[in-house]
Image: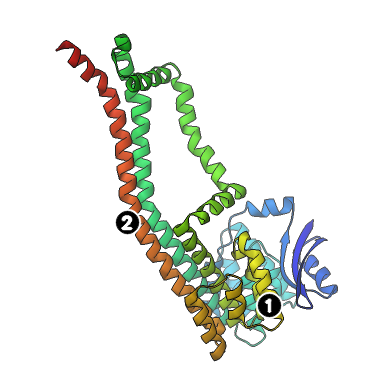
Amino acid sequence: MQFAVKALRQMESATLVFDASNADDARQLAESQGYAVITVRPQGRAALRLGGRARFPLVQFSQSLLTLLEAGLSLVESIDALAEREVRSDVKQTLNALLKKLYEGQTLSAALAAQPAAFPALYVATIRANERTGGLTEAIGRFIQYRHQIDIVKKRVISAAIYPALILAVGGLVILFLMLYVVPRFSQVFEDLGDKIPYLSKVLLEWGQFVHANALIVLSSALALPLFMTYILSRPPVRSGLGRMATRIPRMGEYIRIYQLARFYRSLGMLLRGGIPILGALDMVASLLPASLHASLGRARNDIREGQPLSAAFDTHGLSTPVSLRMLRVGERTGQMGEMMERIAGFFDEDVADAIDWFIRLFEPILMIFIGMVIGVIVLLMYAPIFELAGSIQ
């Protein structure tokens, strides 16, 4: 089985590939070559298999572990208690694997790092930086707070999208009902009128005749289309392409960039507060930025390694805003860079929330007007032959 190992050596990051029986062996191979391991991830079929498993409930596990540790239980006793009460087989297996590593004398961070499918690199790095100083509970609490802040932003986005999605779904169902049920029956009524009906109405009625003659095929296609679109939109290349298109929209692109920077700053701030060196922390959070900013982050990292202040490097390479730049300079003067980055992320989150509220207030009426116009046009075209017929009788 192959594992991709992201590691540091002499302040240079590298990605190595090892053939090993498990992630722990791959880690040991990298460390034997003088590397400081950041992440270990399976490649190939193993990665696909792990990707199909249910996601490990990391926040729930952390909250329960923190409660037991603060109650006075030891680390081994806490994880053992969590494993005993667990009923989900995959989660129980993960906890038992943690216990095995701990009984072998390994540290918690090493045990967590051996299971990268369940425990992300940010979590492992936070634990590793604090377990040596006895600040394990502080590290777990900090990660829980970090995840709660991330979840709050996601819930804002999801909540804002629910009502427009309902409008779109109901409007789409009404349009489908008209096109697949009502229009075909109107086409049978007006079939004998020939050229006495308007052209657009004739096109609509011809569609109705086609649906009536091929009802099974059309209905199957209508049911399969949402599934096909869901599959297409779930593909990473398609999603990245749509993301690039969205970033080119002037106003929207700026807020997408701010949202991405908020995640980047919050994760970087958590690592810095946990004692992770700045260069190593930048490598760990690089994946949170879009591919278009990876080159900028690499250049900023080189500038920081050469001795430039972080604020100057971020400003030069487009990783800051005017407000965040001032706050970074304050963080450098006070030595509280981790806390300041989390404050910057909170400031960015408020900007994104205001933008979402503004967009929804504008988008909802536009969407309702559009759907109403589509339904109105369909109904008007269906009744146009009746108006034409009434006019000819007069």
Foreground: 132 or 184?
184
Q: Say which residue label 2 marks.
A: 361
Foreground: 31 or 264?
264
The picture places residue 188, in percent across and down from the top left corner, at: 32, 14
Write down the quadrant of residue 104 in the picture. bottom right
The picture places residue 330, in percent across and down from the top left corner, at: 51, 86
Q: Is residue 281 left or right of residue 201?
A: right
Q: Say which residue label 1 marks.
A: 303
Residue located at (38% from left, 52% from top): 162
Foreground: 387 or 129?
387
Q: Is residue 94 left or right of residue 204?
A: right
The amino acid pointed to by label 2 is Arg
* Residue 266 visible, this orientation: yes
Vertical order, 24 against 362 (above or below) = below
Q: How many marks?
A: 2
Vertical order, 164 against 128 (above or below) = above
Residue located at (39% from left, 62% from top): 355
The picture places residue 203, in percent across and down from the top left corner, at: 38, 21
- Mark 2 crowd level (few <14, some 14–19, many ≥20, 10 Å Cα): few
User: Mark 1 or 2, which is nearer the eye?
Assistant: 1
Give the residue at the far left of this rendering: 394
Circle nearer the N terminus (1, 2): 1
Give the residue at the far right of this rendering: 33
Vertical order, 243 against 145 (above or below) = above
The amino acid pointed to by label 1 is Asp
- For the C terminus, give its image quadrant: top left
* Residue 99 visible, this orientation: no
- Mark 1 crowd level (few <14, some 14–19, many ≥20, 10 Å Cα): some
